[in-house]
Amino acid sequence: MRMIVSRIPLFAGLLAAVLLAGCATHKTDWSARVGNYTFDQAVLEIGPPDKQAKLKDGTVVAEWLTRRGYSQTYVGAPVYAYSLGYYGGYYGGYSGSYSPDYFLRLTFAPDGKLRTWKRFAR
């Protein structure tokens, strides 16, 4: 029994380390990829773009949706009050909040290499 109890902290620490490692996010350094990253590599890594256009000079501009925005509406509940013989209701009304969609735009030169990148919201 003593051996089992002494291993519990070790097991708990190992479990915490595994869980925290799984929560780490991967941030891509797009600036380091300029000049040597291709459109085909982008499609393989992050999937087909949501929008793309090929310009007359051969430049390809592609956009990926990275995070979907949302809108929420909050409706207030009716509140009734009794004051000085008057009984009436008040409705709290509503309020809302909005978050835009977030995109990644990659521009590839005619030779197929990444020229510029940009994150933006719309």
Image (cartoon, grey):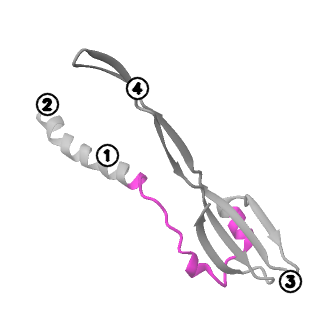
The residue pinned by badge 2 equals: 1
Q: Could you say where residue 65 lies in the image, as x and y percent from the top left? A: 64, 57
Q: Amino acid at mark 3?
A: Asp
Tell me which numbered mark, 2 or 1, is placed earlier along the sequence.
2
Viewer-nearest residue: 15 or 89: 89
For the residues labelled 3 and 2, the Cα–Cα distance comes to 75 Å
| Quarter where residue 116 is shown | bottom right
Q: Amino acid at mark 4?
A: Ala
For the residues labelled 1 and 4, the Cα–Cα distance comes to 44 Å
The residue pinned by badge 1 equals: 15
Contact (CB < 8 A) between labels 1 and 4? no
Above or below 117: residue 99:
above
Tell me which numbered mark, 1 or 4, is placed earlier along the sequence.
1
Mark identifier at residue 57? 3
Number of numbered discs overlaid on the protein picture: 4
Quarter of the image where the N terminus is located: top left
Residue at 51% from the left image edge and 41% from the top image edge? 72
For the residues labelled 3 and 1, the Cα–Cα distance comes to 54 Å
Quarter of the image where the C terminus is located: bottom right
Q: Amino acid at mark 2?
A: Met
Mark identifier at residue 77? 4
Camera-near label (2 vs 1) is 1
Position of residue 57 in the picture relative to residue 66 (left or right) = right
Viewer-nearest residue: 84 or 101: 84
| Residues in magenta, as a range | 21-44
Q: Could you say where residue 37 lies in the image, as x and y percent from the top left? A: 67, 77
Residue at 84% from the left image edge and 76% from the top image edge? 55
